[in-house]
Amino acid sequence: MISTNALQLAQTLVRMNTVSHHSNLDLIHFVRDTLEKLGVKSRLSFNADKTKANLFATLGEGKPAGIILSGHTDTVPWDGQDWTFDPLGATVQDGRLYGRGSADMKAFIAVALAQAEAFLNSDAPFAIHYAFSYDEEVGCFGVKELIADMKDAGIRPLACIVGEPTSMVPAIAHKGVYRYKCCVRGKEAHSSLTPHSVNAIEMAARVVGRVRDMAEGFERHEPRFEGFDVPFSTASVGQFHGGIADNVVPRDAEFRYEFRDLPTADAAGMQAEVIAYARSLEPAMQKVAPSTGITFETICEIPSFLGNRDDAVTRLAQRLAGEQGTTLVAFGTEAGLFKNAGIPTVVCGPGSIQQAHQPDEYVSLDQLARCEAFMQGLAATRQL
């Protein structure tokens, strides 16, 4: 059974509106103040306008190295969703805690925070680091600042546990998420004079077709990575905008697309192929109008993650969670960024991704209890 303290902390965090387009400072300051009462200082790293912050804190200062417990503080919105419960109500009913962020992933942060005193009093030969970030849901932007700040401070952790909802089964791989915007500048004209124009929509459509061709190529030819729901890389176009009237050759068009790459794939090569194809279209466009062209903007680049069953942190997570196996997850996390920073990483947290981002999002109290037992075991651990 989950402790009263941990459940109340989870409810407190869920009741804070930290949708990504809002500030997360109320939550960050609450965690900071809670830790300060225990004599623990926190490092905050901010976004450009100081409306959001990451928090990094060490419990067990002076120990030679530590294990990161990582969680993001932002949530997705609930606009237009049909909720039975108040998204910020943190209602407990029928063995579940309901609310936006309950599964993804405030419950993990709350349970970790509830164990702060136990971590401080632990005889473990390693410290525990809390790493709580902003803007994960919109591109893992905050954690990049957190990792940079951690490096500047000379902190070199032993390992990282990212508490995304895996039903407490350690996950050792996920795909990357790379999103881009393509903008085409053509030359407008009356639609009766098409030879004197460059049709931005038509040029954009050619690039869209190339993205589709790549997606079909991944499905036909890419070596499979068994364990994923879709065991090959994918590509898709999510938005397309262009044109002002039926009888005006459009000057501008833009679209957004994404790659979800296997951990064994070359995401940079995928984008390079799209750019190279776009460049091949430009000479003919610029022969009509030199000002035409195609530009690209990066929306987000979240690297794939590939851990290892034999990593000490994976074995630790298995032992603490009481799980013999591991899993792969389809969703992106901050794990790849920690791994790329040279920190062995595993993803393991309470709740299911099936409930995340959904109306009436919830995490079961049984999952919270399993997570609390995991944290208690971590505090009692004497070696990795």
Image (tube, rainbow, N blue to C red):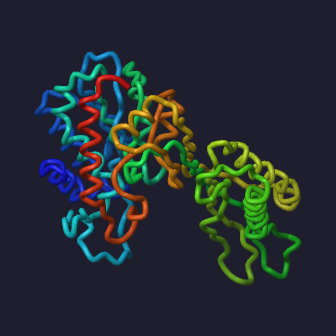
Tell me which corner region of the image, top left, top right, bottom left or bottom right, holds residue 376.
Answer: top left
Q: Is residue 308 left or right of residue 10?
A: right
Tell me which corner region of the image, top left, top right, bottom left or bottom right, holds residue 82.
Answer: bottom left
Q: Residue 36, position in %: x, y?
A: 15, 32
Q: Is residue 321 left or right of residue 328?
A: left
Q: Residue 165, position in %: x, y?
A: 39, 53
Foreground residue, 7 or 275?
7
Locate the C terminus by quadrant. Answer: top left
State the residue at coordinates (43%, 32%): 313
Is residue 318 at least partly visible in the picture? yes
Is residue 186 at least partly visible in the picture? no
Tell me which corner region of the image, top left, top right, bottom left or bottom right, holds residue 76.
Answer: bottom left
- State how many labels appear: 0
State the residue at coordinates (24%, 45%): 372
Q: Is residue 197 above or below residue 101?
A: below
Q: Is residue 34 above or below residue 60?
A: below
State the residue at coordinates (66%, 52%): 296
Foreground residue, 126 or 358?
126
Q: Residue 54, position in %: x, y?
A: 33, 39
Q: Is residue 278 above or below residue 250?
A: above
Q: Residue 339, position in %: x, y?
A: 51, 33
Foreground residue, 256 or 367?
367
